Amino acid sequence: MAFTAADVKNLREMTGVGMMDCKKALAASDGDMEKAVEYLREKGLAASAKKAGRIAAEGMAYAAVINGQGVVVEVNAETDFVGKNEKFVDFVKGVAATVVSCAPANLDALMECKYNGTDLTVLQQQQEMVLVIGENIKVRRFARFPEGVSVPYIHAGGKIGVLVNLAVDGEATDKVLEMGKDMAMQIAALNPRFWDKSQVTPDVLEEEKRIMLAQMDNDPKMANKPAQVKEKIVEGKLNKFYAENCLLQQDFVKDGDVTVEQYMNAVAKAAGVTVRLLDAVRFEKGEGIEKKQENFAEEIASLVK
C-alpha cells in the first residue's frame, strides 16, 4: 500500500516521533497506519525509552525576555557537543517561548503544553529530539517572571543562565538595564546563597553563630574571653558573612569600593527612578546531577578487543 507525505505527517502527530522514523515505519508496514504505530512502539519509542535512562548532565541554561516576560530554562543532553547543536539550541529556545505562552504551573504542566509553533506537546517534541539527535534530552526546570523588569544573562554559551527581576518606578533606561545585567553577571560569577541579608533565616544565623563561637572556644587566644565579648565579636563577623553570601551586601565586582546595593541605588538615582531587586534565578547546567565517570583508555581498549 502506498503512502503520502500527509500520512507521514499524520503519523508524526499521532506518535511524536521524527519524520524519518515515521517514513521508515510506513515503508516497513506497507502504508498501514496501525501497523506503523505498532512498529514505532516496538522500534522508535523503545529506542527513545532506552536513551531516556542515560545520564544527561550537559546541555544548556538559557535566559531571555519574551513578550515582556522573563524566562529561564535548563534543558539537558548527554554531551557538551549536542549542547552546541543548532537544532538543540532551537529546541531550548522553543521551550522558553512555550513557558511564556503557556504559563505552566510546574514541569509536568509544561510537558503537556503545546510546543511553540506546533501541534505537538513539549513531551512529544522532546521525544522527537531524542530520536533526531540520538541522545537523551530532558527539559529539567524553568522559572518565569511575568511582572517587573527582567534582565537575562547567559554565561559561556549556556553553562549558566541568570534572570534578574527588578521593580522599576519610572523608565527602565539603558543604564538601568545595564545595571541589571551587571547584577546578573555577579550572580553568575559568585553564586550568592541569598539576594539580601533579610532573606537569611534564623536557623542559618544560629548555625553560623554556633560555628563562630566554637572556633573562638578552640582558639587559645579567644577561649577565655567573656561570653558577652564573644557575642559582640560574632555580631561583627556576621557582617562579613552577609558580605560574602548576600548579593546586595557583596562588594560590587566591577568596583570594590561599593556594595551591589550601593551601585544599584546610585544608578537608579542618576536615572531619576527607584529600583528594587524583586528576585533572581541562577541555573547552572547539570548542577546536582551525578555525572557518569568515563575511563577513556578502557573504552578504547574495549573497542579494539
Image: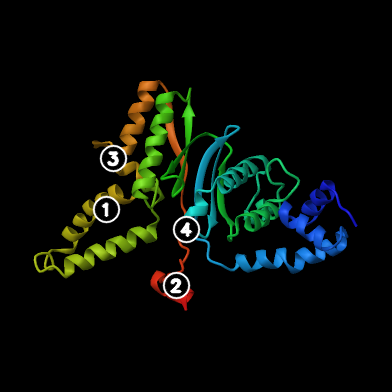
Nearest to N terminus: mark 1 or mark 4: 1
Toward the left, the furthest residue is: 221
Residue 8 versus residue 53: which sits nearer the camera?
Answer: 8
What residue lies at 38% left-to-right and 57% top-to-bottom?
202
Is 111 or 303 nearer to us in this picture? 303
**Quadrant of the rendered structure where residue 155 is?**
top left
The mark closer to the camera, 2 or 4, is 2
Above or below, 32 relative to 151: below
Q: How far is the residue under mark 3 from the one under mark 2?
A: 43 Å
- Dots 2 and 4: beta carbons under 8 Å? no
Which residue position is annotated with label 1?
238
For marks 2 and 4, give the CA distance.
Answer: 23 Å
The CA span between labels 3 and 1 is 21 Å
Question: Dot 1 lies on which element?
Answer: helix
Please name the amino acid that badge 2 sits on: Glu
The residue labelled by disc 4 is 286
Residue 275 visible at all = yes
Of the residues shown, which amino acid type is indicated by label 3? Answer: Val
Callout 2: 10 Å neighbours few (<14), some, many (20+)?
Answer: few
Query: Mark 1 or mark 2, which is nearer to you?
Result: 2
Element type at mark 2? helix
Mark 3 Cα within 10 Å, few/some/many (few <14, many 20+)?
some
Q: Is residue 42 left or right of residue 188?
A: right
Describe the element under mark 3 as helix, strand or loop: loop
Q: Nearer the viewer, mark 3 or mark 4?
A: 4
Q: Are marks 1 and 4 in contact (CB under 8 Å)?
A: no
Q: Which residue is mark 3?
A: 253
Q: Residue furthest bottom?
A: 305
